[in-house]
Image (cartoon, rainbow, N blue to C red):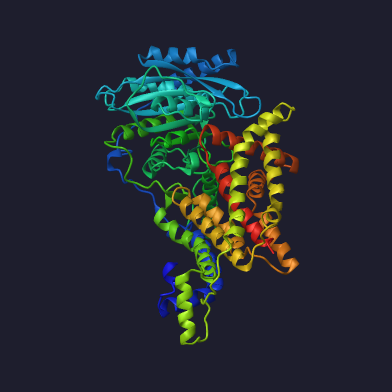
Amino acid sequence: MGLLTSPTAGGSSKKFANILIKWEPVVSPLLYIAGIIWFLALAYHPYNAGTYFSENALLPGLVTNEFSDGSELARLLKALEAEAADHPDTVPHPWIRAQFRQLGLQVYPHNFTLRYPLGNGSVFHGENTYAVLRAPRSGSTEALVLSAPYRRPGAPHPPNHAAVAMLVALAKYFRRQVYWAKDIVFLVTEHEQLGVAAWLSAYHQQPVGHGLLDAGDLPGRAGSIQAAINLEVESATVSHVDVLVEGLNGQLPNLDLVKMAHWICHQEHIQHTTQGRADHPRPHSEAGYRHSLQTLLHMMASQAAGTPTGNHGHYLRYGIQAVTLRALDDRAMPGPRSGLSHLARVLEGMFRSLNNLLERFHQSFFFYLMPATGRYISIGLYMPPFALVAIGIVLRALTCWLRLPDTDDSERQQEAEGAESVGKKGGDACDRPSEPWPLAAVLPCVLAPHALGAVTLAGLVPLTQLLAAAGWPTERAVFAGLLTVSVGSLLLPAITNRRSPLSESGRLLLRCVTLIELGLLVFTAALFNISLALIVTTLYTPVALSARYYSSAPARLLASLCLLLVHPFTLQLAAVALGAPALAWRAVLAADQRALAVALVDSLVYGARLLDVACTVLLPLWLQMWTLVHCG
């Protein structure tokens, strides 16, 4: 920008600036449309790539998986279900530990406590059980983890007794083998993701949850964890295995691990899916493209949410590559059914491959999207179309910068006087008058929205505690707080512009700053969560490019309506409604309240960042665009 706006710049720079100012309003929308079309085309089979193994040491499927003790697995499942029926309100830790001890494993308990941050601040206690199979061929320097959450009868999630029974059966089988070069940890957790987060925090001695989660101490440890498999099994009959990959804040496991899970399922003749969707039999057809596109969009929506789709998501934050295998019995899914023994052989094959690793996963991709189980879109393929979608923000910011008046410094004033003495010729589009920038009027329009966003995020917890004393439910308190801020902030332009209204140059400067902020947000987010970045860019680029003051009342009203449609919490409500289209309006509103409360808890306890971004970045940017429309 300095080269384009320098008073000593040559004629070529001025010519380029004139061309940019003239053609940018046409080029930016065209690039936006071209980028979206290009990105959607990547779901078509010839335009993406097939997955492959980059890590040759894995050697998947080169050995015959030998697990065949289906009767023992059935016996364990029946005994566990009996224990669960006898003790419906507790986790049968004594039974689980007794089974592991009978195998000669090192068995340990793990206790943790959560102070619920909202409302009255309830305290929740939990307990995990883990057993360690020491590697006979190494010195406990590396480890693998096989985990499963225990779910009590009546829990909101489907029962998972078959997964816990399979852990015990596999521990018995693995105990008899002599080829293990890594420790294997069998982990049974309580309270779903909270149990895994607490165990990992205690294992690595890294506190999480801002003091809300007391992870406790572990009486025993294994080696450095290289990889983990989380297991969820609904019933003894398996129609398909869904491989879940999305982790906290959009993190993804190494593609080699995902490929290995699908490959070994294929080897054992178990139907496998991604995003709960099997591959289309004719991927090159129009119907196949639509199917792949829907699968791709499902993954993007899941990744953009920033919440793990399974317990594996918390391993990723520690650099541990992990996936969740969710075995389902869906009557609508065509094809033959499999038993638990087939699934056990899949796990055996995965652990034997992981046992071959000589170093951590590093060769394959960590940034990708999957339109099918055996296809992927790498970062090198999706970044160019994303750049086309977002480049209009940068071009419009540059155009606004070129239209700004020069600052009134002495050097430029002398040059201007010298130019006038020679004789003034006809000006061009980038000639700018010399006048001071209206910083005093623009700064409140930038700082006030950011301060409001920070206060909103920091004030939600005290608000829920205050309203809890009045008998308000936590979900309603969070929703009421955000709704009050969203409605009240609409008056912000009248407050910030009361003493010093924005001039034309002030509106240009505010527009330039807003566009630069939005560009920084989306290009930074694209480096670690492309789905969130692309969704934000697709929705906000059109309104950001058109956000300005309109003298016509109908045009100003239309611009206001478009902005209200992309308000962060309007989008959140729309996402909940699209996720459950069959729900009535009241049910959608209740689901939205629960989703906001869960997002706040996830932010405080786990470090999920979607609500933080919405409050401290998106909301201020939205308010700056709202000010641009109403700053006349």
- Residue 397 appears left or right of 455: left
**Residue at left offset 71%, top offset 39%:** 480
Q: Where is residue 341 in the image (x, y as percent from the top left)?
A: 43, 28
**The N terminus, quarter of image:** bottom left
Residue 572: x, y in percent? 63, 46
Looking at the image, which is closer to me, 171 or 406? 406
Q: Is residue 69 visible?
A: no
Judge from the rendering whether residue 520 lies leftward or rightward of residue 498; answer left or right.
left
Residue 2: x %, y % from top left: 43, 67
Q: Quadrant of the C terminus?
A: bottom right
Q: Along the line of sight, which residue is nearer the eye, 449 or 439?
A: 439
Q: Residue at x 54, y 59 (%)?
A: 513
Vertical order, 481 against 91 (above or below): below
Q: Is 6 located above or below residue 424 in the figure?
A: above
Please identify the quarter of the rendering in which residue 348 is found: top left
Residue 86, quarter of the rendered image:
top right
Residue 401, percent from left and from top: 52, 67
How many numbered markers are drawn? Answer: 0
596 and 464: which one is in front?
Answer: 464
Residue at figure coordinates x 71%, y 64% from the top left: 556
Task: Tell me if residue 564 comes above or below residue 466 in the rendering.
Answer: below
Left-right relation of 528 to 133 = right
Do we see residue 191 in this rendering?
A: yes
